[in-house]
Image: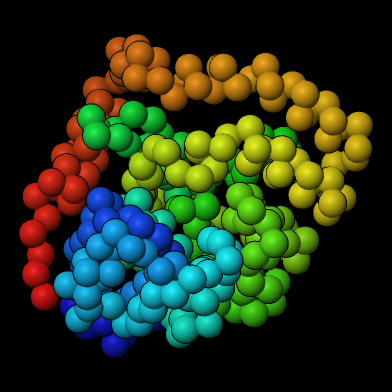
């Protein structure tokens, strides 16, 4: 995709606060995109740890950035949305990374048809030792345990934000799923594509897993997707599921799981792991 003028503008928004150890990986993953018609927006919450120095270092690759106090992640994302001009918008967390072909695959596979559709893909979790888990499921209409995919892989046309509204900054943790529920209410289709992204373990909803799930269930109740009895039941049973989820995310379980992967799957994990390594450890791009 050499002639970027023939393809739609894609806006990417990164909200960050005191992310000096990870923000450069996110920025470099944007700079390494094979798709070039990108508008990159960075909203910093008033960092004091050197994050803004890294942002300034890559300033020529950033269309807009600002550092000031905000009222949480939803408020920061909304500030970015106000500046976004792209037909398609992605949210890249400061501690997450796009595969080099993430955006190109979305544009090619969707054929730039963004009418009443949002696009999600596959997310690989990683830590300092490499890839540890993959989320590669279809949209879950039951909603009991979430949407079946992660918001960090979601790309939303600007027209959808204009129709359903921006993020609810009153929501503390499950701000992304609250927005997606409003998409459902407005008959927006969730389309799975083949793009991938990488997500570091230890985000806000990861650390506060139980609180995040309770907030999510409360939102399902408020929006009428479930009743009071089911809400109470799901919150209660999740307490017993938590140890299983922690085990599923453990290094031991994923090492055990790898023994049952076929050769194609092992090759895929190796390939994506190597590409992640190049971004995190070998990326030395300069403006």
Question: Nearest the camera: 35 or 124?
Answer: 124
- Number of marks present in the image shown: 0
145 versus 284 height, above or below: above
Q: Position of residue 171 (x, y in %)?
A: 68, 57
Residue drawn at point x = 50 percent, y = 57 percent: 154
Q: Position of residue 246 (x, y in %)?
A: 50, 22
202 versus 4 height, above or below: above
Query: Residue 185: which quarter of the image?
Result: bottom right
Residue drawn at point x = 48 percent, y = 17 percent: 247
Q: Is residue 115 visible?
A: no
The residue positioned farthest toward the front in the image shown = 48
Q: Position of residue 98 (x, y in %)?
A: 31, 55
Query: Residue 189: which quarter of the image?
Result: bottom right
**Quarter the C terminus occupies:** bottom left
The residue positioned farthest toward the bottom in the image shown = 5
**Quarter the N terminus occupies:** bottom left
Q: Is residue 104 visible?
A: yes
Residue drawn at point x = 36 percent, y = 42 percent: 200
Residue drawn at point x = 28 percent, y = 52 percent: 22
196 versus 255 height, above or below: below
């Amino acid at each position: 995709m050499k002639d970027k003028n023939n393809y739609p503008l894609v806006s990417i928004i990164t909200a960050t606060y005191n992310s000096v150890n990870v923000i450069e990986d996110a920025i470099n993953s944007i700079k390494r995109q094979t798709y070039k018609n990108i508008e990159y927006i960075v909203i910093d919450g008033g960092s004091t740890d050197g994050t803004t120095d890294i942002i300034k270092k890559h300033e020529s690759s950033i269309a807009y950035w600002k550092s000031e106090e905000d009222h949480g992640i939803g408020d920061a994302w909304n500030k970015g949305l106000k500046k976004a001009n792209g037909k398609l918008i992605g949210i890249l967390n400061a501690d997450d990374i796009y595969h080099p072909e993430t955006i190109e695959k979305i544009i090619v596979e969707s054929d730039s048809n963004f009418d009443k559709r949002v696009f999600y893909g596959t997310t690989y979790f990683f830590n300092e030792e490499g890839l540890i888990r993959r989320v590669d499921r279809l949209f879950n209409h039951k909603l009991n345990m979430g949407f079946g995919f992660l918001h960090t892989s979601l790309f939303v046309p600007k027209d959808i934000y204009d129709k359903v509204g921006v993020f609810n900054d009153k929501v503390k943790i499950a701000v992304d799923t609250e927005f997606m529920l409003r998409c459902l209410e407005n008959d927006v289709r969730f389309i799975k594509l083949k793009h991938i992204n990488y997500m570091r373990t230890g985000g806000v909803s990861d650390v506060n897993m139980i609180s995040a799930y309770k907030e999510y269930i409360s939102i399902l109740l408020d929006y009428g997707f479930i009743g009071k009895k089911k809400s109470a039941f799901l919150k209660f049973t999740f307490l017993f599921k938590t140890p299983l989820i922690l085990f599923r995310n453990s290094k031991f379980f994923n090492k055990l799981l790898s023994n049952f992967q076929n050769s194609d799957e092992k090759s895929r994990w190796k390939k994506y792991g190597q590409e992640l390594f190049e971004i995190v450890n070998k990326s030395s791009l300069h403006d």
